[in-house]
Image (cartoon, rainbow, N blue to C red):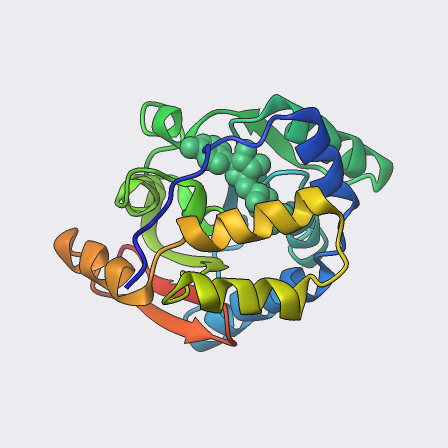
C-alpha cells in the first residue's frame, strides 16, 4: 500500500491558481453536481431558504453551479486562498449570482459564526489537501444544522506509484506541466475509501457513506445530523 504524501493545503501560488482556473474540470464538476442532486432526491427536500456551504470552493466551479440550481438558497463559498476567491468573486459578479465568499481556512471555520447553520455542505477536490484526516468531518459536523446533508467528492489514492503513473498518462496525457504535476501530487496525497470510513466511524458520523467511483474518485454522501 502506498503511504499518503502530503501536499500544501492552500493553493495560492499564482501559476498554480491561473492553471487551475484555466483548466477544464467540467466533467468532474458535472459528476459532483449530479451526485448532489441524487443525494437530495433520495433524502427529504431542503428547507425553503437553505444555507449551502461549499468548502475549499477555489475559483467557484461548484459554488456558481449551486447558485444557479438553488436560486432561493443562501450560498457561501469558503477557501483559505484569497487569490482563488478573487477569481470566484469575479465570476459570480459577471454572472450576477448572489454568493458570499469567505477567506477562511477550515481550521478557522471551526471558530466562526456558521456553526450549526448549514443545510447542505459540499466540497469538490478538497479532502486530499487536508493534512489532518478528520478535519473535513469535524468541520462538517460542526457546521451542520439538524437534517444537514453532505456531499464530498475527491480523488482517491492509487495502490502504487505505477498505478498513479498509469492514471496520469490516461487522464492528462498532454495537459500543461503544472496540471500534470498537481494531478500526480493530488493522487499521492489522497485518502483511500477505507481510511475515510474509519474516520467517519470514529467520529460517529455513521450516516455518511463512502463509495469508490470510476478509477480515481471517492464520494462521501449522506446525512451529517439527524
Ligand atoms: C483543488 S482546489 C478545488 C477547488 C474547487 N472546490 C473546485 O471544485 O474546483 C482545492 C481548494 O481547497 C482550498 N483549501 C485547501 N486546504 C484548505 C483549508 N485547510 N482551508 C480552506 N481552504 C483550503 C485550496 O486553497 C483550493 O482552493
Q: Quadrant of the N terminus?
A: bottom left
- Position of 183 with respect to 40 (left or right) is right
Q: Is residue 191 above or below residue 213?
A: above
The residue nearer to you, when weighing 86 against 144, is: 86
Q: Nearer the viewer, residue 141 or 156?
A: 156
Residue 169 vs residue 94, the one in the foreground? 169
Q: Residue at x 32, y 23 (%)?
A: 111
In the displayed structure image, the side of residue 194 where residue 14 appears, left or right: right
Residue at x 67%, y 34% (from the top left corner): 16
Image quarter of the C terminus? bottom left
Image quadrant where residue 169 sits? bottom right
Left or right: 22, with 225 as reference point: right
Q: Name which residue lies at 50% across and 75% down.
A: 215
Question: Where residue 138 sits: x, y (%)?
Answer: 27, 42
**Quadrant in which residue 157 is drawn:** bottom left
Q: Is residue 208 visible?
A: no
In depth, the one of 141 and 159 nearer the eye is 159
Question: Where residue 175 sits in the image (x, y, percent)?
Answer: 75, 54
Question: Residue placed farthest to the front in the image?
Answer: 162
Measured from the top left, where is residue 59 in percent x and y? 68, 38
- Reply above or below: 4 against 36: above
Q: Is residue 13 visible?
A: yes
Residue at x 82% of width, y 39% of height: 96
Count of labels shown? 0
Amino acid at each position: 500500500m502506498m503511504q499518503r504524501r502530503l501536499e500544501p493545503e492552500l493553493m495560492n501560488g499564482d501559476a498554480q491558481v491561473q492553471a487551475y482556473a484555466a483548466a477544464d474540470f467540467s466533467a468532474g464538476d458535472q459528476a459532483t453536481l449530479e451526485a448532489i442532486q441524487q443525494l437530495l432526491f433520495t433524502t427529504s427536500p431542503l428547507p425553503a431558504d437553505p444555507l449551502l456551504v461549499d468548502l475549499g470552493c477555489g475559483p467557484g466551479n461548484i459554488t456558481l453551479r449551486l447558485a444557479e440550481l438553488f436560486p432561493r438558497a443562501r450560498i457561501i463559498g469558503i477557501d483559505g486562498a484569497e487569490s482563488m476567491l478573487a477569481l470566484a468573486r469575479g465570476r459570480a459578479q459577471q454572472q450576477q449570482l448572489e454568493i458570499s465568499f469567505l477567506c477562511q481556512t477550515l481550521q478557522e471555520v471551526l471558530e466562526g459564526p456558521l456553526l450549526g447553520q448549514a443545510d447542505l455542505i459540499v466540497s469538490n477536490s478538497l479532502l486530499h489537501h487536508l493534512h489532518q484526516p478528520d478535519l473535513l468531518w469535524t468541520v462538517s459536523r460542526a457546521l451542520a444544522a439538524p437534517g444537514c446533508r453532505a456531499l464530498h467528492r475527491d480523488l482517491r489514492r492509487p495502490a502504487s506509484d505505477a498505478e498513479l503513473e498509469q492514471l496520469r498518462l490516461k487522464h492528462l496525457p498532454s495537459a500543461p506541466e503544472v496540471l500534470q504535476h498537481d494531478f500526480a501530487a493530488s493522487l499521492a496525497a489522497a485518502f483511500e475509501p477505507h481510511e475515510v470510513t474509519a474516520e467517519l466511524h470514529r467520529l460517529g458520523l455513521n450516516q455518511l457513506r463512502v463509495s469508490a467511483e470510476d478509477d480515481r474518485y471517492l464520494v462521501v454522501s449522506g446525512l451529517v445530523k439527524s
